[in-house]
Image: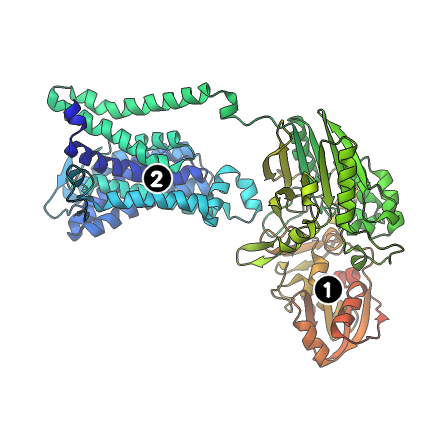
Amino acid sequence: MIDLLTSAVIWGRTLDAATCLLLVALGGYLCIRSGVFNIALEGAMIFACFAAVACSHWASAWGLGVLGGVAAGVLVTGVLALACVYLHADVLLVGLALNLLGLGATPLLLQWAFDIRGGFTSPDVRPLPHLGLPGIDAIPWLDTVISGRTVLTYAAWLLTAVVVIWLGHTRSGLALRAVGLREEIAGASGVPVRRTRAVALLAGGALVGLGGVQLALGDVAQFSENMTSGRGFIALAMVLIAGRRAWTLLPLSVGFAVFDVVGLSLQSEGLPSELGHVLPYAAALAILLLARLWSRRRGPGASMPEIPRLRVVATNDLLGSFHPWPTSYGRLPGGAALRDAVLRLKSQGPALWADAGDFAQGGVISTLTGGLGGFTAMDELGPDVAAAGNHEFDWGTATVRQGARLLSAPLLCANHPAAGLPATAAFELGGVTAGVVGCTTPDLFRLIRERPEVPLAGMAGVIGRAARTLRGEGCDLVIAIVHDGVDWRPGPRGVRHLPARFAAAIRPWAHLVDVIVAGHTLGRWIGTLHGTPVLQPWAFGQEIGVVEFDSALKPARMYAETPGPPAPWHGHGGDLIAAARSRVVGTLARPLRNRLGTDRSLPAYSLPAYVAAAMAGANDCDIGIFGCWSIATGQPPLDGVLAWLDAGEVTEADVLRLVPYSDDSVVLASLTESDLARLRRRDDLAVWARAPRGRAAMTRYASTEIAAHLGRPLEFEPADTGVRPSLRIALSEGDRPG
């Protein structure tokens, strides 16, 4: 027995047998990391074996045999991807059917192609080449074990390293892992879930096909019925044992191959052939049981995460999205789904829901109630604490103070003392005292009509003093809520997140707090800056950000969740939404979108350009100018789109949610050809013109910035028709303005 285990020939055969298992297991590993439990490995493998032998025979070339085997593996997993990823069939049933199909169809294909039963071999079936390794050939024992193996053996070792590095250290690999772990969060982050999963299955099918090629063309170039003998299931067991450690597939494949080769060799020593065949399966079962016992021996803390002592749950910039409005990629969850998601987290332990502002204003409710209805609806939603955003001041400071009295939760605004709102608050949750300081955006007075009586205090000084005070008062944790956040720009695949500006802004005080809840920019960041957790989930209620603190009150885990499924809002203002949705104001022949930097002058595609053209048409002007950021109240930019208006009927609710401003007035001014050329160069303005110069319609809000950009005073006069009436007129005409 010792001689058998130290035999170079036996170990050489072991590496050849391990290659087949390793390649198939790598394919299964990619599938399972994408979230698909692919039990069809056996079926894909037997089809690949047949295709490899058939193609190698017909072409008298091993290379075409490899291509045939890979194609067969991809085809089988392609069927699985189509059925399970796109048609939502049960993956276990489809996988079982493919396995049975492979075992039953290959004998029929064998008889049809070669008019033979049982097995097929021919001198025209070219085996895989065996490669000698320079330097290894001169080393006794190793020259027989390592050198002279098939080309796929060395390729399998290399592919193992590639898979490990790709999954752990590349953006696409991390996206695949995200799809497998939390597809809803991956989708909300802009990852195409179905496409990523389908590509992973096809790549896994290619690897399984290579495993079939190794089995069929490795040593004896032949095909026989049921030649896989359950190796696909052994590979599946290897994937389950490996867990998230792809590198362990290599030693596991060698271990199982040892049982296979030694079992066959022991038959010459009188061991029953049935016992030799069963050894690999017995080993797989034993290792699975040992792995389970080991995880239990390590205790519950090893197999399940510690129960968090406290969760901080973050949202931002709901902007009145209580109804699940349609988006360019689907539909918003809506307030009811958002509330249910937070309540579910709170049912699992102490949790504090902190909102970063711009929660009440925007949409139907606030626009039709002078701003106060949004506060009442937000109170029913139920956050524990919030910071004031700039849009909370849309109807003036007096309205903010009145709205704050409608909230059960404190509305904080430490850097704007004149607003009369508290600077900090403290909460006792499960024996933990959490102190909170909240600040509005430093650009507040650039974004609202009111002029300051007292300038805003510097955020660094305000938060620094508040954090020290809260610590001195016995707070275990300090949370900073700021209506500012990570910037972004449209990218080739969704958005590019740009944290540099925000990171510089928080640098002086980030180390003084335990977590930062951010917002305002409509970007996304679930991670750390300067070592401090930053929660800025997608806005409009699309996501909730969560940081969990362990028993030592250290951040143990950060993640985001997508509420769902979407549900209608039946709380305060639900009747207003329903009434507005029932009033049709016009129709669109094709969808309109607001994607920054694209289609800015084409009202056939661009929503800001459509509004600009509508303002010009309603006020008898040659030019219309509308800020792209002025119509950013529709959806988070998962795909780079800020607002979306679908084709078909457009309702009053659509108009109110896209143009929810307290002041939608339009002003008129004369522009020269040079003025128009300069404004067209700005990627944040939609400029529609039917003449090179003339009278231009623009929002009162944007007029001051436009005059400053042109560097000369403009004479403005009020227009007769505002933004919302202009939009209603254009939609009622049933075609595009201009």
- Residue 660 in which image quadrant: bottom right
**Is tag 1's residue or tag 2's residue first in the polypeptide sequence?**
2
For label 2, the residue is 26
Dot 2, crowdedness within 10 Å: few (<14), some or many (≥20)? many
167 w.r.t. 676: above or below = above
Q: Residue at x 71, y 31 (%)?
A: 476
Spot occupied by residue 165 in the image (x, y as percentages of width and height)? 40, 45
Q: Residue at x 19, y 33 (%)?
A: 11
* Quadrant (top left, top right, bottom left, bottom right) of the C terminus: bottom right
Spot occupied by residue 682 in the image (x, y as percentages of width and height)? 67, 69
Q: Is residue 40 visible?
A: no
Which residue is the extreme one toward the left?
123
In the rendered view, does 366 fall on the left or right side of 139? right
Which structural element holds mark 1? helix
Tell me the CA gap for discs 1 and 2: 57 Å
| Badge 1 amino acid | Ala
Mark seen at residue 730: 1
